[in-house]
Image (cartoon, grey):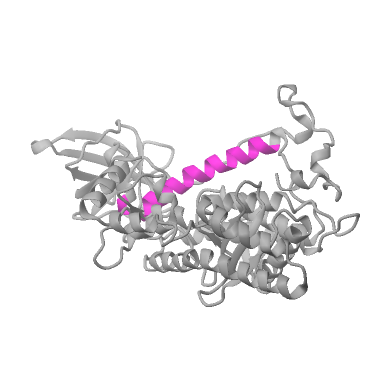
Amino acid sequence: MSTLRALAKAQALAAGVAQPVATVRHLHLSERPLVLVPLAMAGEANAPLAALVGTAPDEARLLIVPQPRNRDQRFRFAAELAAVVLPYLDSFRSVTEAVPVDRGRDVRHRYVDAPQLLVPNPAGISFLRLFGRSTRFRRPDGDYPVHPSVPLLGRWLTFFAERAEQPGSSALVALTDALTLHWATGQSVVEDLHLPALLGWIDPPAGLTGAQAAARAEDPAVCPPAGPATDPEFDNRVLAPAVAAYADAGDDAARDEAYAELERLLRDQLAPTWELMWRGVGLLRALPPGARVAGRWDGDKDAFTGHAEHVDAGGGPQPRRDGAVTAAQRLHRLERALTSYAVQRAYDDPLVMAEHRLTGEAFVGDVTLADPKRVDDTGKRPVLRPRIQLLTTEPVRVPVGATLYSPARPAQKAKVVFLIPAADGKTEVVLELSGGMGRGLTAPPGSVPEVGERLCFTTLSDAYLPAGAFPAPEETPWTHGGPPAARADDAPVASDGDPAEEWA
């Protein structure tokens, strides 16, 4: 936890309401997200019990499994969920756009928009990941066939779960993570995983403090758990008798009545979280998006287009386990994305950049001198190298010769030439600029900072990060298992497998 976030949490506790830790929204919000609130049976490995799903507050569709231990009913639930999710995904596949590549010498096409799934908390993402893993290898034929949409749903859920691991991705978002990215509460990080309590701090009801609203929200009778877990008291006293009544129903009329009662009970459990989901979406929509959010969403659109083309071409489902080279490439890709995401957030948001100013990775100063016409002729040919002088009251913990960048002109580099201590603890910093000024010996207007301009300079760079070099999979070193061989766990699971292992 950074110093500023710790301070914001302390201020939230003192003020009785969550404190903002961002001035802009650092994630994309779709105009039509698919909100999915899952509920799983306690004590069972990913046994779905119910889900409330829809793209608008008044379009919630309830799906239930009357007997979660019944494999046929579980896969019937999967087919019903696929009937909602797959058409939603297909609705984004009608229009494409041309994207220039190879410096404009060629183009590629991608969909103009991509779907977005919203779940209450990280446990909801884990539920979808495991649900996708347990359905993507199923078969529509054999001894225990499933509906053809079930394995397709599993592949798409796996895709979204993998995108959720990508820093900066907005394809699958846990609402608690999205909210805590922008607000700090007066409760612990673990308590922030409870959506009702979190929203109690951010937007408490009139007359209540954040702590009072959170304490009230932790009462299961007021706000049931936000999925996929259920309240043990509800399981024992309410749900278990209702499930038993459905299982023991002797005729169709009794079964229909028991089913209707189950629907009512589960809707009552999920409806409060459904309302909180859209309330949280409204709070996030009130924040203006960061300047670089659209670029990260383009990455989600590229990933969505690529996976859709893979599925259309008859490509196989994602393997259960990555090979050594694939796993290393994936880890490297995630590390690069994490570095880039941290820099982009700092460039977009002064509050995030303030955390780096505290650690000495950035400072803010006023331009006191500027020489925009300075030319360096010591090399083979003269080059434009303007110099500026900044006066800052902040500690400058970068050495002479370091390269700095400014969010105001990210394409421009600034080399530290002199650090001169001034009066009253101030520091004069002389910087030599390069890049972002064209190829001539005259700087275009606005490309060089002017006297009186207040700027932030940082060691954080938003420049392109080249990918690492990895061997081909067939050249996997012996230290990592050698070249991959055909593995049984990469093949589709037999339809007559152990039902207990299907959902593990």
Residue at image x 71%, y 22%? 479
Residue at image x 39%, y 42%? 460
Rendered view: 30 above or below 426: below
Q: Position of residue 222 (x, y in %)?
A: 41, 62
Taking the magenta stretch, the answer to whether it contains residue 227 is no
Q: Is residue 369 visible?
A: no
- Give residue 414's quadrant in the image: top left
* Residue 270 falls left or right of residue 323: left
* Residue 408 falls left or right of residue 26: left
Q: Position of residue 366 (x, y in %)?
A: 20, 50
Q: Where is the C terminus found, in terms of image quarters? A: top right
* Residue 201 falls left or right of residue 142: left
Viewer-proximal residue, 371 or 177? 177
Viewer-proximal residue, 205 or 115? 205
Viewer-proximal residue, 231 or 3? 231
* Residue 292 falls left or right of residue 188: right
The outermost residue toward the right is: 142
Q: Is residue 30 visible?
A: yes
The outermost residue toward the top is: 479
Q: Where is the N terminus found, in terms of image quarters? A: top left
The stretch of residues the image draws in magenta is 326-351
- Give residue 432's quadrant in the image: top left
Viewer-proximal residue, 63 or 338? 63
- Magenta span main SS: helix
Q: Position of residue 125 (x, y in %)?
A: 57, 52
Rendered view: 283 above or below 477: below
